């Protein structure tokens, strides 16, 4: 049985010749078919086109019953790919939110044992089952908001046992949810209190104990380091990435959020799939990224939430580079996984065009999580992860109407999600 979506006002991000990523001025272009149909079969996109060319067999009833959805007035998008989240965490940190309003900075809160260490303390006391239940609430929430693929990092464990606990929860999410999941090991997210005066010893623990067991249990697709002022240095990062590479773990880095940390350069040197954040990015970093396979991935919600200067998206795109956008869903700097809001922030704060943000949350973000071949666009043979909007006039309306949830119907792996 197939699923036909007909009378679509506009079918967004279609490709006859799929691209791995979209760079520079190409980002302002978007394929979109008005008055379209989309036909799904066996969890995959089988066909699409304009209504007047629809093959009659797709509308068959009788012995071959296809399910038919009439999408009059509605727009169909490929599901968002969110290539950077920390959504497996315990509890929340709204007290720090208030501290920030009163004037404390992110780094000051972290230095007082708040921030990531605060979340780690709570997570260490939380059972795997409880952590799974809390995380699944967030997963189900982002599915309803249109996300069909998500990367999730560890990094709130900071002991071998607790890092493994997070990665096992991520594996359970992978097994039990229709959303596509990639797992990233981020043991080097913060230096635990007991290693405060001996950071290198913690780096040794990550390298000699955590990475080998994470790899042997095949719990991670990628490896990450928070390479930034007050967290891990470029040298620490290099050591950890080298160790990860020995076990086949490709890098996806937190780089240049709080300072010119050298993270971009290290990421490029080790062929990172993406370097993420990039609030502190100048000509050197941009030149370093040119001609590489490393995707600059911007997280406008965390810059917005922390009141940091925005990453220079325009400069990066105008230099001919691609940009991906991600939510960074985490309790400290971005307590939201709403990718539609990320599109709005991309437009409003980063001065990206609607077409550019759509490319950045679909094709380019699929690239940033290693899913270009299967996700991120409407292509015959790709996984049928799409959503249908409410009645809206145009695709620009999505980032424009920043406070409304406009996702009406979600389809993952060809199946309707209730
Ligand atoms: O991506 N920058 C590092 N890690 C997270 C924040 C984590 C936290 O504050 O809990 C981020 O913003
Ligand atoms: Fe992050």
Image: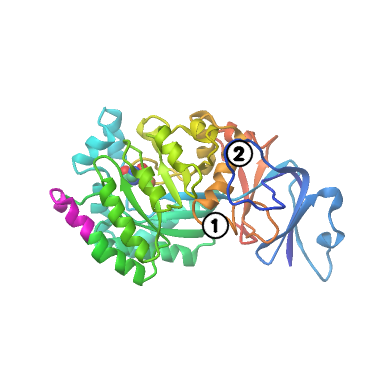
Q: Is residue 198 magenta?
A: yes
**How would you classify the magenta stretch by its main secondary structure?**
helix
Q: Is residue 151 magenta?
A: no
Residue range in magenta is 194-204
Q: Find numbered disc 2 in the image and state the secondary structure of the residue it sits on.
A: helix
Judge by depth and name the residue closer to the eye, 165 or 255.
255
Depth check, mark 1 against mark 2: the one in front is: 2
Left/right placement of residue 67 relative to residue 24 reads right
Residue 407, x across and y down, in percent: 60, 45
Quadrant where the C terminus is found in the figure: bottom right
Residue 363, x across and y down, in percent: 58, 48
Left/right placement of residue 247 relative to residue 110 reads right
Residue of label 1: 371
Judge by depth and name the residue closer to the eye, 246 or 386.
246
Crowdedness of circle 2 by 10 Å Cα count: few (<14), some, many (20+)?
A: many
Of the two numbered discs 1 and 2 on the same chain, state the one appearing first in sequence.
2
């Amino acid at each position: 049985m197939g699923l036909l979506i007909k009378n679509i006002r506009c079918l967004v991000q279609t490709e006859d010749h799929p691209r791995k990523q979209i760079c520079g001025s190409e980002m302002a272009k978007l394929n979109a078919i008005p008055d379209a149909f989309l036909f799904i079969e066996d969890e995959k996109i089988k066909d699409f086109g304009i209504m007047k060319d629809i093959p009659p067999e797709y509308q068959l009833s009788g012995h071959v019953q296809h399910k038919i959805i009439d999408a009059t007035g509605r727009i169909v998008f490929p599901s968002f790919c969110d290539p950077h989240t920390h959504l497996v965490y315990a509890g929340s940190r709204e007290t720090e939110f208030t501290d920030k309003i009163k004037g404390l900075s992110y780094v000051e809160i972290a230095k007082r044992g708040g921030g990531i260490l605060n979340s780690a303390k709570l997570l260490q006391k939380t059972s795997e089952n409880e952590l799974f239940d809390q995380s699944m609430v967030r997963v189900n929430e982002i599915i309803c908001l249109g996300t069909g693929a998500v990367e999730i990092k560890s990094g709130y464990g900071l002991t071998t046992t607790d890092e493994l606990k997070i990665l096992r929860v991520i594996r359970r999410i992978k097994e039990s949810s229709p959303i596509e999941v990639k797992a990233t090991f981020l043991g080097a997210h913060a230096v635990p209190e007991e290693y405060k005066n001996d950071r290198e010893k913690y780096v040794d623990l990550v390298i000699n104990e955590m990475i080998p067991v994470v790899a042997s249990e095949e719990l991670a697709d990628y490896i990450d380091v928070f390479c930034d002022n007050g967290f891990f240095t470029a040298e620490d990062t290099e050591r950890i990435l080298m160790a990860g590479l020995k076990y086949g773990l490709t890098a996806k880095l937190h780089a240049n959020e709080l300072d010119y940390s050298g993270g971009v350069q290290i990421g490029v040197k080790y062929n990172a799939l993406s370097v993420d954040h990039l609030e502190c990015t100048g000509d050197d970093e941009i030149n370093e990224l040119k001609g590489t396979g490393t995707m600059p991935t911007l997280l406008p919600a965390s810059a917005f939430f922390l009141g940091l200067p925005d990453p220079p998206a325009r400069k990066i795109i105008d230099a001919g580079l691609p940009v991906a956008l991600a939510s960074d869903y985490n309790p400290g700097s971005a307590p939201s996984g709403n990718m539609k809001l990320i599109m709005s922030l991309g437009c409003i704060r980063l001065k990206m065009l609607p077409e550019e943000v759509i490319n950045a949350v679909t094709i380019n973000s699929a690239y940033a999580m290693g899913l270009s071949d299967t996700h991120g666009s409407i292509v015959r043979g790709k996984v049928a992860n799409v959503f249908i909007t409410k009645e809206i006039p145009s695709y620009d309306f999505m980032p424009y109407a920043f406070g409304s949830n406009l996702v009406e119907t979600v389809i993952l792996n060809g199946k309707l999600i209730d």
